[in-house]
Image (cartoon, helix red, strand yellow):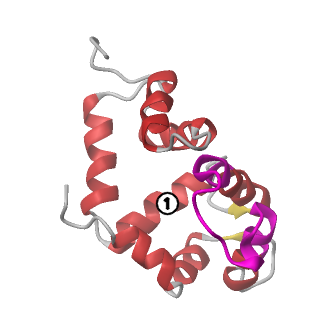
Amino acid sequence: DTPSGLLDKEVFAKIYKQFFPFGDPTTFANFIFDVFDKDGDGTINFKEFICALSITSRGNLDDKLTWAFELYDLDGDGFITFDEMLSIVDSIYKMVGNMVQLPEDEKTPQLRCEKIFSQMDTDGDGKLTKEEFRDGCKHDPSVVQALTLYDGLV
């Protein structure tokens, strides 16, 4: 219940917990919250919620990749560092718990991030530009499938 029409981090995390009852979605929900909360006031208003939902559910692939880049670029400096990626991936692993069977080379967040960076960091500088991230995602069928799964359903 949000009588004010605003979502705070605590309520947002509780909503995520309903969808991921076998893991701990709190950290990931906080990362998502921060991207939704465009004005940085600590709440998500109806407009912020609808805009983010529109991009994530109905946007084209480039829009979704831009949104995902904002999620992973935790400090907003225009790059995704290994540590930023590790923070997000670790939170995803905690959220899904043991519900997903992972390949051997992705068994841990560290391994998954090493694999991603080896594929995407084309200039080897230890950080991903938006272009490297977009190109890498577009060449990974599992990422494209995940980003387009709900097209047109919402």
Q: Residue 113: x and y, percent?
A: 74, 68
Q: Quadrant of residue 117?
A: bottom right
Displayed quadrant of residue 123: bottom right
Q: Residue at x 43, y 43 (%)?
A: 19
Location of the C terminus (image quadrant): bottom left
The location of residue 118, given as percent across then percent down, is: 76, 82
Residue 79 included in the magenta stretch of the image: no
Q: Is residue 86 left or right of residue 99?
A: right
Q: Which residue is mark 1?
A: 68
On screen, residue 14 versus residue 75, left or right, reads: left
Above or below for 78 versus 91 = below
| Front residue of this view, candidates 83 and 77 | 83
| Residue occupying the far top of the picture | 3
* Amino acid type of the residue tagged 1 in the rendering: Ala
Q: How many marks?
A: 1
| On screen, residue 10 above or below 98 | above
Q: Nearer the viewer, residue 91 or 35?
A: 91
* Quadrant housing residue 89: bottom right
Which secondary structure class fits the magenta region best? Answer: helix
Q: Position of residue 22 (x, y in %)?
A: 57, 43
49 lies above or below 128: above
Residue drawn 43% across the image and 36% down it: 18
Residues in magenta, as a range: 91-114
Q: Residue at x 81, y 64 (%)?
A: 110
Please identify the quadrant where the N terminus is shown.
top left
Q: Camera-side residue: 110 or 61?
A: 110
Instruction: Report helix, strand or loop for mark 1.
Output: helix
